Image: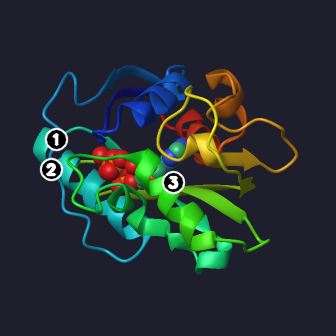
Amino acid sequence: MLEKLVIATHNKGKVVEMATSLQEHVRTILSADDIDVPEVEETEDSFAGNALLKARACAKATKLPSLADDSGLCVNALGGKPGIHSARWAELEGQEGRDFKLAMGFIDDKLGKNKDRSAYFIAVLALVFPDGEEHIFEGRIEGNLIWPPSGDKGFGYDPMFVPEGKRQTFGEMEPEEKRKISHRAKALAKLSEFLKTYA
Ligand code: ITT
């Protein structure tokens, strides 16, 4: 059991998914609503690199164990794009803030008539302690992209992603179901195993 953990993200969808599955392993979970979580420029070229940047900056600023998530949607026919630029794709075309309807349309346009609509979500979690101890946990889920998007229960690219073996998109699924099978769920399960052994 860990005494305190800061969830170092400004994405509320991530906070809910992460806090829900970690509550039995952490006594007090803090997020950007409770404590100043630094905004970090994501300058690395890998999910793990960017997750570490975010977690290290938070651990340094708060002096508390900090958990960051760097994640994205990788489309096979687009050579793995948008990948580490998944959030940024929603900021293109001069839009204010993030517009995932636009970003999803962008992906569908680029796929055109391509029959291969396979993609995967990946989440890399970085846990960084103020004394410098660092751990990485990764999860992936394969699936296919549909058009038009459907469902308003998730966030980001959820409405266009149907996980392999399922009929509904992540946007149509009940949050508990997504929390059982998603990329983030898989990474969180590995983190939970680690926290079980944490004295
Ligand atoms: P933080 O950096 O503050 O954590 P962010 O939203 O900028 O928040 P990322 O840099 O990791 O996070 O960008 C990943 C983007 O990929 C994110 O904005 C989502 O749109 C998308 N994404 C990641 N996980 C997702 C999920 O479970 N469902 C849908 N979209 C997801």
Q: Which residue is mark 2?
A: 60
Mark 3 or 2, closer to the camera: 3
Q: Nearer the viewer, residue 154 or 124?
A: 154
Residue 114 position by quadrant: bottom right
Give the structural element (helix, strand or loop) at label 1. Answer: loop
For label 3, the residue is 104
Question: Where in the figure is residue 119, as x and y percent of width and height?
Answer: 68, 63
In the rendered structure, the answer to whether residue 62 lies left or right of residue 24 reads left
Q: Amino acid at mark 1?
A: Lys
Please give the label number shown on residue 31.
none
Q: Is residue 139 above or below residue 174?
A: below
* Amino acid type, residue under disc 3 in the picture: Met
| Residue type at the position of mark 2 | Lys
Marks 3 and 2, how far apart at CA: 35 Å
- One can see residue 189 in this view: yes
- Circle 1 packing at 10 Å, graded few (<14), some (14-19), many (20+), is some
Whether the residues at callouts 3 and 2 have beta carbons within 8 Å, the answer is no
Of the numbered discs in the image, which one, if any, rests on residue 63? 1
**Where residue 93 sits: x, y (%)?**
28, 62
Residue name at image x 20 percent, y 48 percent: 96
Which of 38 and 55 lies nearest the eye of the viewer?
38
Say few, some or many: other residues with alpha carbon within 10 Å of mark 2 (under 14 / 14 to 19 / 20 or more).
Answer: some
